[in-house]
Amino acid sequence: MSDEPTRRRRPRDAKEAKPSRLRFSPRAIWLAGVPFVMLPLFVGLYLLGQNPIEPLIEALANEDRLEHQIEELKQESSELQQDIDGLGPGQFGIEKRARERLGWSKPGEVVIHVPDKR
């Protein structure tokens, strides 16, 4: 034998290699562990009659309904703003609209309503 220190021989193919030990990061353990804790909790609450998912579903449905309502109100606001802009400057346009739509009149005026021919 020679005086050289013995060297470990590296495996040449994967079959000879030892399987390496898997190491998981704390984040991976946390992400994998949460479902194992939450699922039994939800099942237990459901079996006790306290459905934890139903309020979440209702909240999502309510959110969709409110978003739709907001869009409708924005559209109505836009239409009203266009109507206001169409009245023109001064009080004349506002006064004319009040007379046409609401039937208002100035003191001392007589309003005559003529029915439409249909």
Image (cartoon, rainbow, N blue to C red):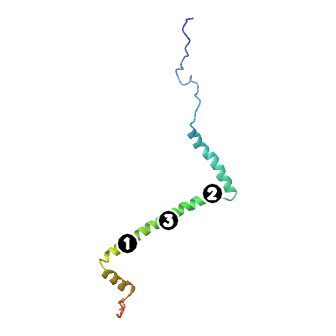
Secondary structure type for disc 3 = helix
Q: Residues within 10 Å of mark 2 (few under 14, many from 20)?
A: some
Q: Amino acid at mark 3?
A: Leu
Q: Position of residue 63 (x, y in %)?
A: 51, 62
Q: Residue at x 64, y 47 (%)?
A: 37
The residue that appears at 56% across and 40% down in the rendered structure is 27
The numbered mark, 1 or 3, whose residue comes first in the sequence reads 3
Q: Classify residue 7 by image quadrant.
A: top right
Residue, disc 2: 52
Q: Position of residue 56 (x, y in %)?
A: 58, 58
How far is mark 1 from mark 3, CA to CA? 20 Å
Q: Would residue 86 be found to the left or right of residue 71 on screen?
A: left
Question: Quadrant of the image for the N terminus?
Answer: top right
Residue at 58 percent of width and 24 percent of height: 18
Return the residue at label 1: 79
The numbered mark, 2 or 3, whose residue comes first in the sequence reads 2
How would you rate the neighbour count of disc 1 (Cα within 10 Å): few for under 14, some for 14-19, many for 20 or more? Answer: few
Q: Could you tell me how many numbered marks the image carries?
A: 3
Residue identifier under label 3:
66
- Give how far apart the Cα atoms at labels 1 and 2 are: 42 Å
Between the residue at mark 2 and the residue at mark 3, the CA separation in whole angstroms equals 22 Å
In front here: 23 or 94? 94
Residue type, label 1: Glu
User: Circle 1 — which element?
Assistant: helix
Position of residue 30 measured from the top left corner of the image (x, y, whole percent): 59, 42
Look at the numbered disc 2 and give the secondary structure of its residue. Answer: loop
Q: Looking at the figure, which quarter contains the C terminus?
A: bottom left
Picture coordinates of residue 15 (x, y %)?
56, 24
94 lies above or below 16: below
